Image (cartoon, grey):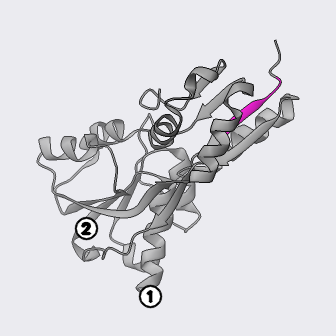
């Protein structure tokens, strides 16, 4: 049957993705769609390393791109700083955000996850410098693990943090019994949602829609 209510949980790591899918659904369905940011993004103030020794920048999300360029701006540096550096983006959405800053990704993996990024990158790497991973504090370990296994020199800088939005999660709890679908676009959003609603999920009789196997 047609859903009477469609609920979309938006994780701001890739707002362009959630906006795109929500727009498509609104154009083809009479369902009600709510976009709720259940995670807040805060940029870190950790100092970036000397970029002259960096060969590759790894951007694992659109938020990482924005946080990195905010850091450059704070240091009064422009994109000419990156002239000698190649860039890898975890997926097409992250690559599109990077392009907004006038920088185009040199490498995008066939599947948008960190493990695929690492495994497919091996064939593109030439050992002339260090790979700099630009990620969140709570990033998954697969990416650095694969690089370490292949003796690829890397450094890791957490450029943003994620924290749960209490009011948004409370709203989700209140609406659980009337929802037909919950769309979860990241593992961080899924963890925050389940942690907040663990005692209430029995009230949700609808369907889960997840972006990627890890989120599922």
Q: Tell me whether the residue at label 1 lies in contact with that at label 2, contact meaning CB atoms closer than 8 angstroms.
A: no
Magenta region: 4-8
Residue position for label 1: 76
- Badge 1 marks a residue whose secondary structure is loop
Q: Mark 1 or 2, which is nearer the eye?
A: 1
- Badge 2 marks a residue whose secondary structure is strand
Residue appearing at x 83%, y 29% in the figure: 31
Would you place residue 137 above or below residue 10 in this image? Answer: below
Quadrant in which residue 108 is drawn: top left
Q: Is residue 120 visible?
A: yes
- How far from the left and from the top, in percent, is residue 205? 65, 17
Q: Residue furthest right?
A: 30
Quadrant in which residue 175 is drawn: top right
- How far from the left and from the top, in percent, is residue 98? 52, 60
Residue appearing at x 28%, y 74% in the figure: 51
Residue position for label 2: 54
- Frontmost residue, 30 versus 21: 30
Q: Residues within 10 Å of mark 1 (few under 14, many from 20)?
A: few
Mark-to-mark CA distance, 1 and 2: 19 Å
Q: Earlier in the sequence, mark 1 or mark 2?
A: 2
Whether residue 10 appears in magenta in the rendering, the answer is no
- Frontmost residue, 50 versus 128: 50
Q: Is residue 190 left or right of residue 50?
A: right
Q: Residue furthest top?
A: 1
């Amino acid at each position: 049957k047609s859903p009477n209510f469609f609920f979309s949980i938006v994780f701001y790591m890739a707002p362009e993705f959630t906006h795109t899918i929500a727009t498509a659904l609104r154009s083809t369905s009479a369902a009600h769609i709510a976009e709720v940011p259940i995670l807040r993004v805060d940029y870190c103030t950790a100092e970036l390393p000397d970029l002259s020794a960096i060969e590759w920048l790894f951007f694992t999300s659109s938020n990482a791109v924005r946080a990195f360029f905010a850091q450059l701006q704070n240091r009064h540096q422009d994109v000419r700083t990156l002239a000698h550096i190649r860039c890898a983006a975890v997926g097409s959405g992250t690559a599109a955000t990077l392009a907004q800053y006038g920088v185009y990704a040199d490498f995008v993996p066939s599947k948008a996850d960190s493990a695929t990024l690492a495994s497919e990158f091996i064939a593109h790497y030439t050992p002339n410098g260090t790979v700099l991973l630009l990620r969140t504090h709570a990033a998954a370990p697969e990416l650095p693990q694969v690089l370490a296994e292949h003796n690829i020199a890397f450094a890791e800088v957490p450029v943003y943090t994620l924290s749960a939005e209490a009011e948004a999660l409370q709203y989700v709890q209140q609406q659980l019994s009337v929802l037909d679908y919950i769309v979860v676009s990241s593992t961080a959003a899924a963890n925050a949602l389940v942690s907040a609603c663990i005692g209430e999920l029995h009230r949700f009789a609808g369907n889960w829609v997840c972006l990627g196997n890890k989120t599922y």
